[in-house]
Amino acid sequence: MRLTVVGCSGSYPGPHSPASCYLLEAEDPRDPAGRTWRVLLDLGSGALGALHVHADPLAVDAVLLSHLHADHCLDLSGYYVMRKYHPSGAQPRIPVWGPAGTADRMARAYDLPLDPGMHHEFDFREWSGPIEVGPFSVTPVPMAHPVDAFGLRVSADGVTIAYTGDTGPTPALEDLARDADLFLAEASFRSVDTNPPDLHLTGADGGRVARRAGVRRLVLTHVPPWFDPADALAEAAAEYDGPIELARAGAVYDL
């Protein structure tokens, strides 16, 4: 499985990265043609343009939304335009998984009537349990955030990526990250600050979860542009002695 960081800036696009979007690619051993399947974990503000650098956006098989804040979902509006009005013709519907209300939320984002909204372009489905998309097995895990939010545990090719989405500290994080080959953990807050509950993680939180869950590699992401990412890295390193790095737009991980 290959992970490409399309965007990793926290809360809004930063000077060096779009907001949250991660491209996963894997071949399906059950498919005699051996084609590559592609899914997106989130499609946040500014990510659709950057996606063109890494893959043909029309070759994406599904979009998996962790939650419905703009920095994780809003570029689905542009993707709707691309799939509806592309010069090669209207594209086939693809599934979009997300929390309850995703279809209406996205229709309102583009000022569309709720019916048909974006239903002709996307097959909206609500998170209610594990799913499969080609070679990908995906398990949503409810997180602690002001809106319905899910961490996503994705397995393919014998490896597992755990993605927190946005969350405050919660025991569910250890279940999400257990023995993951790569733990993609948000680090929006700093431990030195007084932070509101049930909103985001610090680098130290991510490091503790990585240690307790036995993950093989920790990648810190979603650091807002107003913070120095090195602070999150230092916090995590004090809690976890395995491989740690900061996500950066364009980074590729072959697992």
Image: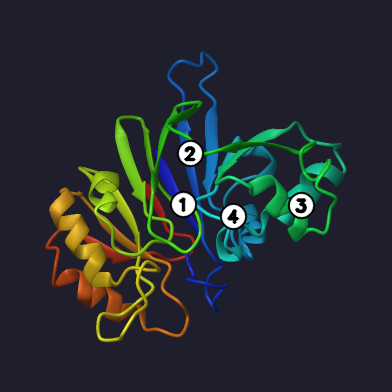
Label 2 vs label 1: CA separation? 8 Å
Q: Quadrant of the N terminus?
A: top left
Within the image, what quadrant is residue 144 found in? bottom left
Label 1 vs label 4: CA separation? 13 Å
Q: Which of marks 2 and 3 is in front?
A: 3
Residue 194 placement, left or right of 112? left
59 is higher (above) or lower (below) than 196: above
Identify the residue position indicated by label 3 in the image.
107
Q: What element carries label 4?
A: loop
Badge 2, how many Cα within 10 Å: few under 14, some, many 20+? many
Identify the residue position indicated by label 1 in the image.
4
Identify the residue position indicated by label 2 in the image.
25
Q: Which amino acid does label 1 sit on?
A: Thr
Q: Quadrant of the C terminus?
A: top left
Label 1 vs label 3: CA separation? 28 Å
Identify the residue position indicated by label 4 in the image.
43
Q: Is disc 2 in contact with disc 1, using a CB cutoff of under 8 Å?
A: yes
Residue at 30% of width from left, 46% of height from top?
176
In the foreground, 21 or 105: 105
Q: Which of marks 2 and 3 is nearer the N terminus?
A: 2
Q: What residue type is labelled 2?
A: Glu
Label 2 vs label 3: CA separation? 28 Å
Residue 209 placement, left or right of 57? left
Q: Which of marks 2 and 4 is in front?
A: 4
In the foreground, 32 or 153: 153
Badge 4, how many Cα within 10 Å: few under 14, some, many 20+? many
